[in-house]
Amino acid sequence: MDQAPQADSTASRAGPEQRLLAALPGWRAVGRCRRGMAGASGISAGCHALAHPAIGVALIDLVPQVTPNAEARLRRALDAASFSDLCPGTLPVWHGRVEPMQLRRLPDILAEGFDSLPPLGLGGPEGWIGAVQAALARDPAWEVPGRPRSPAKEEGKAKEAEAPLPRRRLPRWAVASLALVVCLVGGIALLPATPAPTSPDPAPAPVLAALPSQAAPAPIPHALPQIERVELPVIRPAAPPPAPEPEPVAEAPAASAMPPPDPTPPVPEPDLIAPPPAPPPPPPVRQASAPRPRIDPNCSRALFRFQQGERLSSAEEAYVRNGCATRR
């Protein structure tokens, strides 16, 4: 059962590999990656791994095939097989895509690609190529011509195919949501049934019979006590006391009885020296009024042209910057 698919893959690989090896004399095919992406042809095979004893390893994708992370897959297979312990040194690896029409120029394309990489630094002329091929044969991501797959890995794959699929566990958020829905449904079921709506009571009929009017109570006369008349006394102002009688004044003696005046003439009082009068204030100094600024008509015309958006000359621009008021 397994021989037919293996024969088909070998036949599909033989054509591209033969064309690559025919275009690259001196190179050897060491394997092909199985993790490629299908192009327009629908074949999902990956890149071809070619090795040259004096150059390095070239990973070539023939368009439309694409192999993502091809160099990383190759390095991972070499590390798993302890290739650096067997062949210490530098192994340059180049990965590129080539159009079928570019197979004639493939040697030049590889030469340009390896010029940007460090040179090959592995011991032995061709011993490292066998080590690379053995490492790729152990990795399930690579297919090596002339070497079957590892039996241990084939058995592991068969066991994986026969093993039952693990039960898919629901995530926590799904379990929590399901529990919440169950709680809500149970709570709604436990609620008491709501009574059927009843029709509202009819409104009472208005009372048409008029109530008998009650007679207003007659006012009860209250007996008021008799108010006695009280006469208040009139308060009159007190009379002022009588004025005292003036005492008699003695009459002055006659002028003839007075003694004669003293003949001593009065001494004239010395005249006081009056201070000099204060000088009159100086007359106010009249300051000449500042001349009023006169508007230059040229400046007015410059401002008018500036407001109209016209182009100004240098003199008119000076008017606009400095203003139009001039003192003359």
Image: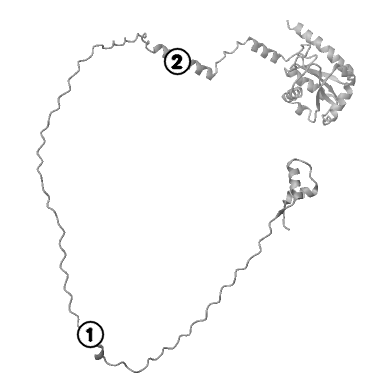
Considering every residue shown, the one lying at the far bottom of the view is 263
- Bin the neighbour count of mark 1 within 10 Å (Cα to Cα): few under 14, some 14-19, many 20 and up: few
Residue 169, image x, y percentages: 55, 15
In the image, residue 287 sits, relative to residue 307, either above or below, namely below
Label disc, if present, on residue 93 of the rendered structure: none
Residues under labels 1 and 2: Cα distance? 139 Å
91 in relation to 8, above or below: below
Secondary structure category for the residue under label 1: loop
> Residue 167 at what x, y percent from top left?
57, 13
Q: What colour scheme governs how the chains and residues are painted in the rendered image of this protein?
A: one colour
Query: Which residue is at the front of the view, 56 or 232?
Result: 232
Q: Which of 297 and 198 is in front in this view?
A: 297
Q: Quadrant of residue 17?
A: top right
Residue found at x 84% / y 14%: 16
| On screen, residue 268 above or below 93 | below
Residue hosting label 1: 252
Identity of the amino acid at label 2? Leu
Residue pictured at 15% horizontal, 57% vertical: 236
**According to the image, label 2 marks what residue?**
184
Name the image quarter holding the C terminus.
Answer: bottom right
Name the residue rendered at 59%, 70% in the picture: 283
Q: What residue type is labelled 1?
A: Ala
Residue 319 screen position, x and y as percent? 75, 50
Is 149 on the left or on the right of 235, as rendered?
right
